[in-house]
Image (spheres, coloured by chain):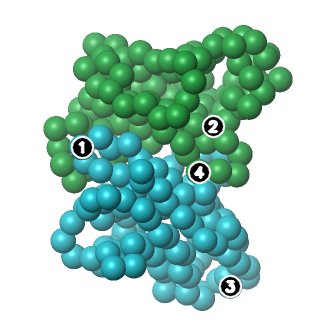
Chain colours: A green, B cyan
Amino acid sequence: DAGVTQSPTHLIKTRGQQVTLRCSPKSGHDTVSWYQQALGQGPQFIFQYYEEEERQRGNFPDRFSGHQFPNYSSELNVNALLLGDSALYLCASRRRDLMNTEAFFGQGTRLTVV
Amino acid sequence: AQSVTQPDIHITVSEGASLELRCNYSYGATPYLFWYVQSPGQGLQLLLKYFSGDTLVQGIKGFEAEFKRSQSSFNLRKPSVHWSDAAEYFCAVGAWVDYKLSFGAGTTVTVRA
């Protein structure tokens, strides 16, 4: 089992550009959540996808959008990048129908905006 | 709204000494509680979790945590730390319904020889 995989591992973008980050959930998992972790801070919830729809959203602007595909993999898109978007972006997956189970996190994508 | 407070930003402990990391949460119902560890530049590894039942939970790497509802706390402990325990530790709270996790700001643990 490969666990949660994210790509790319590192990325450098220029202010104003757009970026797409990718996440493949752990085998058997159908729910994907995205988190932003700025340097020196705890992860902040961005949004959650289930059945290809956004189900929950944290306090992030509309520049942050996502998608979930039929195979449960997910993308996070960020438009009009700002310097403040530089962070580690973490993807987490779980099986929605199981209670008392934890979310599994990927290794993250380190985004640097210059 | 749910929230987590980790009062200690940085803790230094000697190898072999005991460790306790504090976590206080705010949540309107019975919470799911977690402790994660993160090494530099890495993702989050789950140390332990509390969903219900016994309030003292055992985790990996010799860690344990105790859920105290009256104090809204979920403190993490380890009797004897190893140099490899140096890392960032995060406490998180969530609910099974939406599973939106709220994390504390983290506690950095430094282990001295």
SS for callout 3: strand
The chain to which mark 4 is attached is A
Give the position of the C terminus of chain B as an image quadrant: bottom right
Report the residue at 47% width, 56% height from top.
Answer: B3
| Residue B82 visible in the shown view | yes
Q: Do labels 2 and 3 share a chain?
A: no
Q: Position of residue A10 (x, y in %)?
A: 67, 28
Q: Mark 3 to mark 1: distance in Å?
A: 41 Å
User: Up-down: is A28 above or below A103?
Assistant: above
User: For this rendering, which residue is in front, B59 or A14?
Assistant: A14
Could you tell me the amino acid type at mark 3?
Answer: Ser
- Please tell me the numbered disc located at residue B14: 3
Q: Could you classify mark 4 by the number of other residues whose Cα lies within 10 Å: few (under 14), some (14-19), or many (20 or more)?
A: many
Q: Are marks 3 and 1 on the same chain?
A: yes
Residue B78 left/right relative to B71 = right
Q: Where is residue A14 in the image (x, y as percent from the top left)?
A: 79, 16
The amino acid sitting under disc 4 is Gly
Task: Identify the subunit bearing mark 3.
Answer: B
Residue B65 quadrant = bottom left
Secondary structure of the residue carrying tag 1 is loop
Name the residue carrying label 2. A88
Residue nearer the viewer, B102 or A102: B102
Q: Distance between the residues labelled 3 and 4?
A: 25 Å
- Earlier sequence position, callout 2 versus callout 4: 4
Residue located at (25% from left, 20% from top) = A51
Q: Mark 1 lies on which chain?
A: B
What label sits on residue B97 in the rendered view? 1
Query: How far is the residue under mark 4 from the one under mark 1?
Result: 22 Å
Cα separation between marks 2 and 3:
30 Å
Three-letter code for the amino acid on which mark 2 is drawn: Leu
